């Protein structure tokens, strides 16, 4: 029988002070029973002797200080897990919201998890195909990697997230692949888009979805990504599945963290975010990876919208330190109707060299990757020069590079949100584009690769 307390001393917004408590610990889950019989859940934020500060998951309206009762459960927030979660939609607190039955759990797991021991990690080195050329060809995603997408407000990161969730797969078809998708602080319209898109395309069958809406409490927003990662850890390390975790939007998560921190009157850090933002983000991101002795893995794509498109804002800045690269969406490409508008030059996958080559993608991948980057960069410089000095000032070779840059954006980067390209198709398109340039300019590719793969008619 749980001990009940009728010692609520103060309620201030989402926070509540309970006095005379015994044995209550930080992060412990509790519930408040109102005189009407209504139950509201809460979490312990701070314990000082016999006083506990708790945060409500729901609003505090109607709480009577004298007649309401508080009970503490002796454990943190837990997620009931089972393979039956696949194909289901849950709230940010792990409750089914798709009209289906409650999950009969194999077990209940604390959502805060345990950090993966660095000594037990296996280095990521296996290619994951997203079907998106700008990622697969140039900023390759590797199994066990953390590769964030940096977006801006109004850019189509939701469509890109849905596309990756639909199309991503490990090329070895025998391996079980699942997607855990967590939407954090999104609008009802966006939530409706994700659910309909996943259901229509059949992607829902291999997906566990957690939906936290903008009108849900801030404390729930903080729990949502942890719920998703707990489900991913269960599927990866207990059911030996390869799990891709997509978290959108991490900016909303950090804003909720700032809101709770301000309510607790903590000393603010950069831009008002708590000083422990870096550590807090690391507790999420570092739960991805591969583990010794386990067949499964967790690959993570956190998506964040940069306020004012500022890469030096604390959220993208700190995320960049913890993760292995970034995919950046460009407003300029979006205006040109390039879809998805991935800006490949500032984008980076630090592990791409480990996931490409013979037996993983194709022998020519590394050379074409370097050549495409170099040619696109020179082509953009040529276009800039052309806009200043006019076309007549450019050499014949520079004009070819300018043409290459335009064709590269239209044919390689732009593919729409429903085109799923195999890695072979992506590499072949790269060779077709390189055939625009003279063979003498292909200095980053071995001659035997040029002989084997460059379209003959253009040599």
Image (cartoon, grey):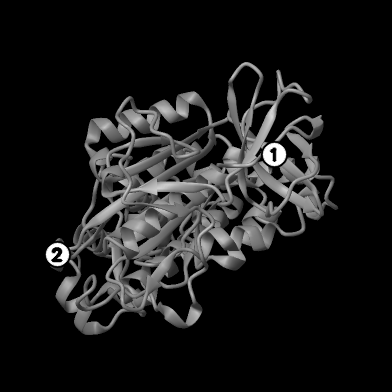
Residue 11 position in % (x across, y down):
79, 30
Locate the C terminus by quadrant.
Answer: bottom left
- Report whether residue 443 is seen: yes
> Which of the pair 295/40 is nearer the observer?
40
Q: In this view, does 179 lie to the left or right of 29?
A: left
Query: Which residue is the site of mark 1?
Result: 55
Q: Quadrant of residue 96?
A: top left
Residue most toward the front?
A: 1
Q: Nearer the viewer, mark 1 or mark 2?
A: 1
State the SS at label 1. strand
Residue 266 vs residue 315: left or right?
A: right
Residue at image point 32% right, 57% down:
235
Left or right side of 69 for 415 = left
Going from the N terminus, do you reach mark 1 or mark 2 first? 1
Q: Work out how far the residue at label 1 is from the one at label 2, CA to CA, in angstroms.
A: 69 Å
Name the residue: 58% across, 38% down: 220
Q: In this view, does 286 lie above or below 29?
A: below
Q: Percent x, y for residue 433?
A: 29, 60
Q: Which mark is residue 457?
A: 2
Indicate the quadrant containing the N terminus: top left, top right, bottom left or bottom right: top right
- The quarter holding residue 418 reads top left
Question: Residue at coordinates 75% horizontally, 50% vertically from top-left?
Answer: 46
Relative to 385, residue 338 above or below = above
Instruction: Confirm whether residue 215 shows in the render.
Output: no
Q: Can you tell which mark lies on residue 90?
A: none
Residue 212 locus on image (x, y percent): 51, 35
The answer to whether mark 1 and mark 2 are in CB contact below 8 A is no
């Amino acid at each position: 029988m749980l001990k009940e307390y009728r010692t609520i001393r103060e309620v201030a917004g989402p926070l509540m002070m309970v006095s005379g408590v015994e044995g209550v610990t930080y992060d412990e889950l509790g519930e408040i029973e109102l005189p009407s019989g209504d139950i509201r859940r809460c979490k312990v934020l701070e314990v000082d002797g016999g006083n506990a500060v708790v945060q409500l998951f729901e609003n505090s309206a109607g709480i009577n200080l004298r007649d309401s009762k508080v009970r503490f459960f002796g454990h943190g927030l837990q997620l009931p897990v089972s393979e039956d979660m696949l194909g289901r939609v849950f709230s940010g607190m792990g409750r089914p919201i798709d009209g289906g039955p409650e999950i009969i759990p194999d077990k209940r797991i604390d959502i805060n998890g345990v950090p993966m021991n660095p000594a037990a990690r296996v280095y990521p080195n296996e290619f994951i195909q997203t079907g998106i050329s700008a990622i697969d060809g140039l900023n390759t995603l590797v199994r066990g990697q953390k590769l964030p997408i940096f977006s801006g407000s109004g850019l189509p990161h939701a469509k890109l997230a849905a596309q990756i969730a639909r199309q991503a797969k490990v090329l070895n078809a025998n391996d079980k692949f699942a997607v855990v998708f967590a939407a954090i602080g999104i609008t009802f319209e966006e939530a409706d888009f994700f659910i309909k898109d996943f259901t229509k395309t059949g992607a829902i069958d291999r997906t566990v979805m957690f939906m936290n809406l903008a009108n849900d409490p801030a404390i729930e927003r903080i729990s949502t990504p942890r719920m998703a990662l707990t489900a991913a850890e269960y599927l990866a390390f207990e059911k030996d599945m390869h799990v891709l975790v997509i978290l959108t939007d991490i900016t909303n998560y950090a804003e909720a963290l700032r809101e709770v921190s301000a309510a607790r009157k903590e000393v603010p850090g950069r831009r008002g975010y708590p000083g422990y933002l870096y550590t807090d983000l690391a507790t999420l991101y570092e739960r991805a990876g591969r583990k010794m002795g386990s067949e499964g893995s967790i690959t993570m794509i956190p998506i964040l919208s940069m306020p004012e498109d500022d890469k030096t804002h604390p959220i993208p800045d700190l995320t960049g330190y913890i993760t292995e690269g970034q995919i950046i969406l460009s407003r300029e490409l979006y205006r040109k109707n390039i879809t998805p508008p991935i800006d490949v030059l500032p984008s980076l996958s630090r592990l791409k060299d480990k996931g490409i080559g013979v037996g993983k993608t194709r022998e020519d991948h590394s050379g074409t990757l370097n050549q495409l980057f170099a040619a696109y960069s020179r082509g953009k410089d040529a276009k800039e020069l052309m806009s200043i000095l006019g076309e007549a000032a450019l050499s014949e070779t520079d004009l070819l590079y300018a043409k290459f840059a335009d064709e590269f954006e239209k044919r390689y980067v732009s593919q729409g949100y429903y085109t799923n390209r195999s890695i072979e198709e992506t590499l072949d398109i790269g060779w077709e584009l390189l055939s625009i340039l003279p063979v003498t300019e292909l200095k980053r590719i071995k001659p035997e690769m040029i002989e084997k793969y460059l379209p003959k008619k253009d040599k």
